[in-house]
Image (tube, grey):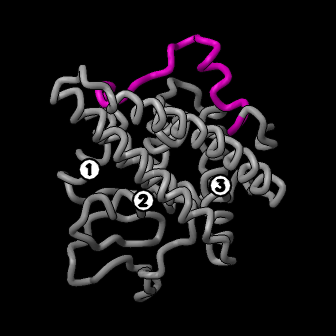
Amino acid sequence: MKKQCGKILSSACLSLLTVLATMSTATGGTNVYGLQEDPLVATVFETGIHSRDFEEVRYVILQRLMARFAEDHKIVVSKDEVDSYLVAQRRFMALDRQRRELRRTELTEQLQSDQLTDAQRSTLAKNLEILNDLADADRDAADDNSPEVRAYSEQLAKTFILRWKVNRALYRQYGGRIIFQQTGPEPLDAYRTFLQEQEAIGHFKILDPAYEKKFWHYFTTDALHDFYQPGSVEEARAFDKLFPDSAVAE
């Protein structure tokens, strides 16, 4: 349950600083997101959100709020930071491929044993199949070095770095506990405090009670998350650098 809920919000947060969706239209001075025949379930700034999909509503609210936060705090990503990120990423992926290749060799050798039970052989074979599929995907990716792929990689890197910088800025401003996420450390308490402030000053409002409950559930339910040890060195250094050898730091 922890991983599932964390993955949902991480995916949303990873995209929240990309270009705003083009579904917004202006009507009588008020922006409208979505189809007007769908119910009006929330507002964010001057935009009314019409939707029947809670994940879409949460995405739009977070996207608009965090984009404004980045703009207000002049948080930007330089080309040097993107290049540094991509170099560090390629280095990490190369090491990961080496580890997987070693594991593929180990599994292949283990499967040659006649001492395995059927269950053991089945488990090893499934693990080897997964690693083989990953190796095939690596080869396909290496073969595709088109301008489109490079542009996509750069945009993804920029989005990831911008999200990390926003998380760092939120943590520095509000403090609180940090949780482990698949895409890096996330200042959960800072998010909650920031969102409560934004709601209090009217920057967003969730009109549907069921959606409001679901929206706050992630930020107020500790059982969903794995926390950094409070007061630990790991917590204190969580936002020192995006990668240990990258240039993305203060």
* Relative to 153, 3 lies left or right: left
Label at residue 70: 3
- Residue 233 in the magenta stretch? The answer is yes
* Relative to 116, 131 lies left or right: right
* Relative to 245, 205 lies left or right: left
| Marks 2 and 1 close (CB-CB < 8 Å) | no
Q: Position of residue 79 (x, y in %)?
A: 81, 60
Label at residue 61: 2
Question: Label 1 to label 3, Cα distance in Å?
Answer: 24 Å
- From the viewer's perspective, is residue 187 above or below residue 137? above
Q: Residues within 10 Å of mark 3 (few under 14, many from 20)?
A: some
Residue at 48% in and 59% down: 137
Residue at 25% in and 33% down: 123
Question: Mark 2: which secondary structure?
Answer: helix
Label at residue 212: 1
The type of residue carrying mark 2 is Ile
Q: Position of residue 4 (x, y in %)?
A: 30, 41
Question: Mark 1: which secondary structure?
Answer: helix
- From the viewer's perspective, is residue 184 above or below residue 205? above
Q: So how many labels did they put on this image?
A: 3
